[in-house]
Each structure stands twice: as structure tokens, then as C-alpha cells.
Image (tube, rainbow, N blue to C red):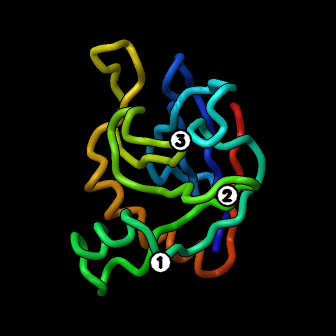
Amino acid sequence: MGDLHLHRIEERDRSTLGLLTLDGEKLCDTLERGPGPNRPQLDRIPAGTHTLHIRREGGYHARYLKRYGPDFHKGMVEVLVPDRTFILFHIGNYWRDSLGCILTGDGRFIDGDGELAIGKSRDTYKRVYPTLFAAAKSGGSIKVSED
């Protein structure tokens, strides 16, 4: 598996826009919560290199299994972060859709509150999930950087 890298490229009070690449090629846009320092279980994950893992429990796993079926969905891709759990890649367009997770999408815009947002999240997730799953299955990692 290649080099997965999440480049954080813009932030607002509550939202952080990123670019997810594989070996330097764009996979998709990403959205996380803002850089707030006072919500450690909800804020975006710290910069650094984090191992990927397959999680086959929890509400997201059950919903995605039902939505996509067992031939496609084999488990949620989790980012392992010390002292945190359930940091997942999943669908969502707005910072409120993430409780510390990484949302996947294509296309960027500003929402009605002046925060960053992404579009086409469901289609994008379906497109990038196989790559993310393969990386997690092989014991890969993701580098997260503040560009």
C-alpha cells in the first residue's frame, strides 16, 4: 500500500478542510472539526503518523453494513489515536457531522455560518473506501500534517 497523507489546508473556528492523497495523488477532500483545544474527545486528531485499523463494531459499522451490504462494506476504517476511540472515516458534509472523525467528499464550499464544508460525501466515500480499507487491512498508516 502506498503513502496516505492528510494535508490540512485551511481552518476556521469550527472546521478544518483537508486534502487526502495517496502517493501524492489526490483521493478526495476531507473535513474535520476545528482546532479547538478544549474538547479532546471531539476535536480533530493531532498531526503525526497514525496507524489505520478495521473496526467491526458500533453504530456506524451497522449502518454502513446495512446501506452498502457485506460484499462492499467490510468494516469501518479507524485511525488509532492514543486515548481516543472510534476515530473513523465516514460520510458527512459539515463540521457538525464529525465528532473527531474524518469526513470524505469532493468539492469545497462555505456553509451558511461561514464554516468550511465539503460536497458529494456519499459518492466520494464509496469511491475511496476500497483504498482506505486496503490500507487498514495491510496495517498501513496515515500521515496528518498542517500544511
Q: Secondary structure at mark 3?
A: strand
Q: Which mark is residue 19?
A: 3
The residue drawn where x is 36% and y is 45% is: 105
In the picture provided, is 21 more to the left or to the right than 127? Answer: right
Please identify the quadrant where the C terminus is shown.
top right
Query: Where does the image place residue 88, in percent across and percent down from the top left?
Result: 51, 57
| 112 vs 60, nearest the viewer | 60
Q: CA distance from mark 2 to mark 3?
A: 12 Å
> Mark 3 or mark 2, which is nearer the start of the sequence?
3
Quarter occupied by residue 29: top left
Q: Which mark is residue 142?
A: 2
Query: Where does the image place residue 103, in percent across and percent down from the top left?
Result: 43, 47
Q: Residues within 10 Å of mark 2 (few under 14, many from 20)?
A: many
Circles 2 and 1: CB distance less than 8 Å?
no
Residue type at the position of mark 1: Arg
Residue type at the position of mark 3: Leu
Q: Secondary structure at mark 1?
A: loop
Quarter occupied by residue 42: top right
The residue drawn where x is 51% and y is 67% is: 77
Please identify the quadrant where the N terminus is shown.
bottom right
> Mark 1 or mark 2, which is nearer the start of the sequence?
1
What residue did someone put label 1 on?
A: 56
The residue drawn where x is 29% and y is 38% is: 119
- Mark toward the viewer: 1 or 3: 1
Q: Is residue 116 above or below residue 69?
A: above
The residue drawn where x is 34% and y is 63% is: 127
Residue type at the position of mark 2: Ile
Q: Secondary structure at mark 2?
A: strand
